[in-house]
């Protein structure tokens, strides 16, 4: 009988205990960086026919809407004209929602606490991201108000001069 069992061949089976698990719907999404600026008439200033003693004040309200924290800086890549050398300027930052600065509350002065420095010196010192001013650690839906004050002093050499500049608020993560 042993011979009969020895002649019986069982098929080889590749058997083992097996258990699997999976992780479905894997994804990777990059965060976003986004900022908006609200200014009167889409400009920091649009003053014409200014006379000595003119003292325009405006606020630009920025809102960071990106999904990841970012640093925001303000700079001025394009500046022209000679009136900036005559205009006294002060720049502050703080809180508020109105572009006429009606509800502005200052958190600090970025430029000219003394009230004697000229606009062109400020603009020419902040021309790109590396030299940008007002470095702000922004988080989603945070806002900041930037208050600009100008004063045209009595100076006959300012007659007929103009100045233009581009203001940029850039957010980087």
Image: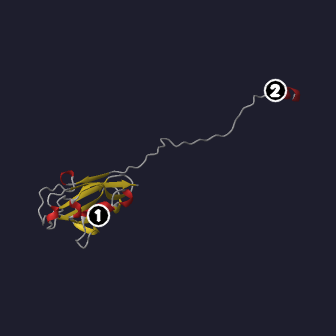
Kindly tell me whether residue 70 is visible in this rendering.
Answer: no
Residue at position x 12%, y 60% from top?
A: 50
Toward the front, the furthest residue is 157
The image quadrant where one finds the N terminus is: top right
N-terminal of the two: label 1 or label 2? 2
Q: Residue at x 59, y 41 (%)?
A: 20
Question: Which of the numbered marks, if any, corresponds to residue 61?
Answer: none
Residue 1, placed above or below residue 100:
above
Question: What quarter of the picture does the C terminus occupy?
Answer: bottom left
Q: As displayed, is residue 33 above or below residue 87?
A: above
Where 135 sits versus 11, above or below? Answer: below
The residue to which callout 2 is attached is: 8
Left or right: where does residue 74 sit relative to residue 6?
A: left
Residue 66 position, x and y percent, is: 35, 52
As measured in the structure, the alpha-carbon distance from the residue carrying label 1 to the one carrying label 2 is 98 Å
Which one is in front, 173 or 20? 173
């Amino acid at each position: 009988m042993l011979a009969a069992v020895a002649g019986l061949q069982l098929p080889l089976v590749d058997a083992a205990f097996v258990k699997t698990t999976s992780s479905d719907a894997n994804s990777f999404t990059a965060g976003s960086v986004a900022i908006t600026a609200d200014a009167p008439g889409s400009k920091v200033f649009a003053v014409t026919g200014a006379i000595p003693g003119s003292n325009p004040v405006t606020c630009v309200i920025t809102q960071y809407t990106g999904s990841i924290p970012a640093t925001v800086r303000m700079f001025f890549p394009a500046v022209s004209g000679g009136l900036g050398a005559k205009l006294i300027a002060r720049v502050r930052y703080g809180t508020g929602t109105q572009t006429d600065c009606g509800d502005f509350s200052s958190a600090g002065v970025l430029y000219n606490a003394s009230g004697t420095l000229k606009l062109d010196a400020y603009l020419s010192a902040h021309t790109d991201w590396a030299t940008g001013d007002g470095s702000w650690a922004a988080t989603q839906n945070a806002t900041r108000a930037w208050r600009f004050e100008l004063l045209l002093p009595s100076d006959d050499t300012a007659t007929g001069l103009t100045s233009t500049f581009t203001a940029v608020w850039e957010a980087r993560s």
